[in-house]
Amino acid sequence: LLQRPDQPRGPCPPPDTHPQDELDDIDFSGKKVAYFGTGDQSGYPDNFQDAMGILEEKISELKGTTVGNWPTDGYEHESSRAVKNGKFVGLALDEDNQSELTEERIQKWVAQLKTEFGL
């Protein structure tokens, strides 16, 4: 959503581009929203998972309820807009540096979501 697949890998679009604003007409009141993102915490340690945080900020402004917060333990990044109250706002995956942890993280996160969604 925040970076098109046809764009080269690298920084998000320029600041004058705000794709998340396309969500302005959606009413997220009463909706639970879970986020996940992939990124490279070694290559982008100062903005690892920022796009997930930007999206969560926007949907929260539109009254969406965030579920699926994920611990930051075991990650090696410097900062992220996706970290709120000491946790990621969703599942943060790093296939470049921690691919061996992906399957277990997904399984645990899905189990957590089932509880949070009351399933």
Image: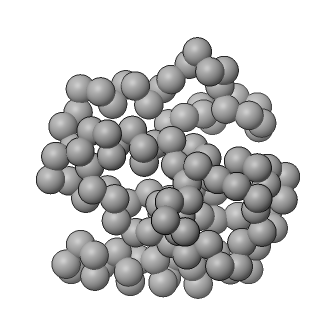
Along the line of sight, which residue is nearer the eye, 112 or 57? 57
**Residue 48 appears anywhere in the view:** no
Up/down of 25 relative to 67, above or below: above
Instruction: Locate residue 75, reporting x and y percent.
Output: 71, 72
Image quadrant containing the C terminus: bottom left
The single residue placed furthest to the left in the displayed view is 30
Horizontal and vertical percent for residue 86?
A: 55, 69
User: Would residue 46 be visible to someone looking at this image?
Assistant: yes
| x 26%, y 49%: residue | 64
Name which quarter of the figure residue 101 lies in.
Answer: bottom right
Residue at the right extreme? 43
In the image, residue 69 above or below residue 55: below
Q: Report the side of 6 relative to 115 (left or right).
A: right
Position in image of residue 112 (x %, y %): 38, 80
The quadrant in which residue 76 appears is: bottom right
Residue at the spot 71% in from the left edge and 47% down from the top edge:
47
Q: In the rendered view, does 54 fall on the left or right side of 9?
A: left
How many labels, in total?
0
**Image-based side of 78 in relation to 110, left or right:** right
Residue plotted at (46% across, 77% down): 109
Nearer-the-camera pick, 63 or 98:
63
Q: Residue at x 76, y 62 (%)?
A: 77
| Of 95 and 74, the residue lying toward us | 74
Q: Is residue 63 left or right of residue 87?
A: left
